[in-house]
Image (cartoon, helix red, strand yellow):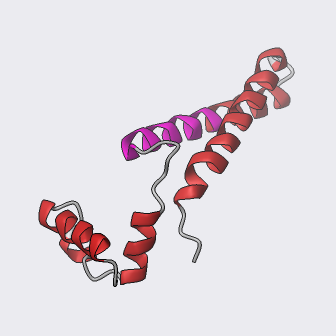
Amino acid sequence: MTDPTRRARRDALIAAGAIPVDEIEATEEQFAYAVATPNVVVQNPTVRRIAGIVLGVASLLTSAAIVIDGSSPAFDISAITTPAGALVLFLAGAFQVGVTTPNVPRS
């Protein structure tokens, strides 16, 4: 790491305890990538985590409802499950492309 600004930021993060001691040995290139590519869509990791969990649970519940609806002749709730499935699928895809993927290192 030749950039003194990055080194100073790294040292400040280590001193503040933001980088766990067992992760200090990360390569200089990994740290430079992490500092240079913050997620500008959703910067708060707690919000990203909660949104991912909500979308995941909604996907599982909607999928289960669609399977049960399709396999049971006793009732027909496809008027609800079809639009709900489409909405959850769209939101999960948008979240993946717009929020999750920009946070995955390229190499």
On the image, which quarter does residue 64 sit in?
Answer: top right
In the image: residue 102, left or right of residue 43: right
Q: Quick one: 2 or 67, which is closer to the camera?
A: 2
Judged by its main secondary structure, the magenta piece is: helix
Q: Residue at x 52, y 34 (%)?
A: 54
Q: Quick one: 70 or 86, which is closer to the camera?
A: 86
Residue 75 at least partly seen: no
Q: Residue at x 27, y 76 (%)?
A: 4
Q: Decide: is 60 above or below 81.
A: below
Q: Decide: is 91 above or below 78.
A: below
Q: Residue at x 23, y 76 (%)?
A: 22
Which segment did they paint magenta? Answer: 44-59
On the image, which quarter does residue 89 sit in?
Answer: top right
In the image: residue 36, left or right of residue 69: left
Q: Residue at x 58, y 37 (%)?
A: 55
Where's residue 106, x and y in %?
59, 72
Verify whether residue 36 appears in magenta.
no
In the image: residue 48, left or right of residue 12: right
Q: Quick one: 107 or 70, which is closer to the camera?
A: 107
In the orientation shown, which residue stands out farthest toward the front?
4
Where's residue 18, x and y in %?
22, 60
In the orientation shown, which residue stands out farthest toward the left?
15
Where's residue 85, x and y in %?
75, 30
Q: Decide: is 39 above or below 28.
A: above
